[in-house]
Image: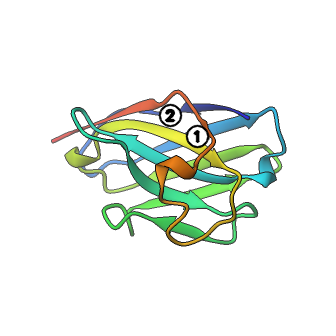
Amino acid sequence: VQLQASGGGLVQAGGSLRLSCAASGRTFTDYVMGWFRQAPGQEREFVAAISRRGGSTGYADSVKGRFTISRDNAKNMVYLQMNSLKPEDTAVYYCAADRNPFLLGSYSREYEYDYWGQGTLVTVSS
């Protein structure tokens, strides 16, 4: 599956952004979808994931209550709504697709994901 992330940009602290990820090439509903991010000089980390039908979600503690992941299976799209942004949210954000079932402890592991998008940069100024 091919993934194309978009929607990044520069925003002030406290602001909002919505990232989008368009999927193509395979059956979208076969995949758990996730968002990861990588800040400068740091390792890539899990942000959020959503089950194949969208009924279950999971979040990193650092974004819980501020970010919301959703998907539109009719459009082969996954979104990340980011509110109350902080400077520490500055990173390149990647969407990814996982063929495995949506399982606690599995969906947050980078190596579980099979396909990755190219990333979109989010910069939060203080």
Q: Earlier in the sequence, mark 1 or mark 2?
A: 2
The answer to whether the residues at label 1 and label 2 have Cβ atoms under 8 Å apart is yes
Q: Please, what is the three-letter code of the amino acid marked with disc 1?
A: Ser
64 sits left or right of 32 in the view: left
Can you tell which quarter of the image residue 60 is in? bottom left
With respect to residue 73, does 63 lie above or below? below
Residue under the point 34% across and 67% down: 61
73 sits left or right of 16 in the view: right
Can you tell which quarter of the image residue 55 is in? bottom right
With respect to residue 25, does 97 lie above or below? below
Rate crowding at label 1 as few (under 14), some (14 to 19) or many (20 or more) other CA atoms within 10 Å: many
Image spot of residue 66 (x, y percent)? 38, 62
Rate crowding at label 2 as few (under 14), some (14 to 19) or many (20 or more) other CA atoms within 10 Å: some
Q: Nearer the viewer, residue 68 or 61?
A: 61
The disc placed on residue 20 is 1
Can you tell which quarter of the image residue 56 is in? bottom right
Q: Determine the residue located farthest toward the top in the rendered image.
A: 118
Q: Please, what is the three-letter code of the amino acid marked with disc 2?
A: Gly
Give the CA distance from mark 1 to mark 2: 6 Å
How many numbered dots are placed on residues in this image?
A: 2
Image spot of residue 82 (x, y percent)? 42, 52
Image spot of residue 4 (x, y percent)? 62, 30
Mark 2 lies on residue: 7
